[in-house]
Amino acid sequence: MQSALRLARHRAPIRCLATAASPSHVAGSYSTATTTPSKPKAAAVPLSNVEAMWTKLTAEEKDGVRAQIEVLNQKSWKDLSIDDKKAAYYVSFGPHGARTPVSKPGDGLKVFGGVLVTLSVSAVLFFGVRAMAPEAPRTINKEWQEASNQRALDQKMNPITGISSEDYKGKGFVVSQK
């Protein structure tokens, strides 16, 4: 996207505001801003194998290739050679710039290994903590919970929909299997 924006952006020279000063005075004080530096013409890069050379090209050479492609795109697509079509496609849609792949080959295996290590460490911590934990409280056993059910019935606790109601079919306070 940025390369396309760079191609579309027109670099206009800095203009002088209408003032009493003449352009020659402004040019003398801001000579680097108003004059266009003369760039040496870069040698034309062959488009035959631009895919292989793209990463090794300098920014000026890449701009030259883009300019060559821009000129080629003015022509009929049928008149272009296969190499020119491949170069135009690669420069426009290739895996560079914003389209550079985020992950490298083999990264999925590293992520899978990291997940396995994390799960293993968490399992060891879980079972280690459970092994060192004190035994369960005395109220978490079946006899205690059945006694809680009997006490709720004796006190007629929740007589409309709860354990003391006529149609109640639930377990009441019994939740443990031991």
Image: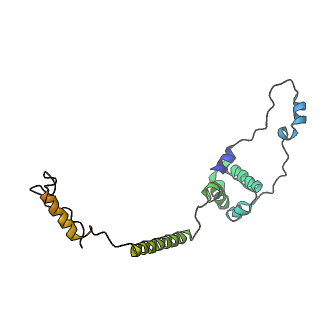
Question: Is residue 170 shown to the viewer in this render?
Answer: no
- Horizontal and vertical percent position of residue 98: 62, 55
Question: Is residue 98 shown to the viewer in this render?
Answer: yes
Please state if 56 lies on the left or on the right of 41 as rendered: left
Residue drawn at x 83%, y 52% as measured from the top left:
41
Please state if 132 lies on the left or on the right of 100 as rendered: left
Looking at this view, is 93 or 108 the one in front? 108
- Horizontal and vertical percent position of residue 16: 81, 31
Residue extending farthest to the left is: 166
- Horizontal and vertical percent position of residue 117: 50, 73
Residue drawn at x 52%, y 70% as measured from the top left:
114
- Horizontal and vertical percent position of residue 29: 89, 35
Q: From this view, report whether residue 32 is shown above or below residue 67.
A: above
Q: Quadrant of residue 34?
A: top right
Looking at this view, is 132 or 75 the one in front? 132
Please state if 52 lies on the left or on the right of 147 as rendered: right
Looking at this view, is 65 or 11 the one in front? 11
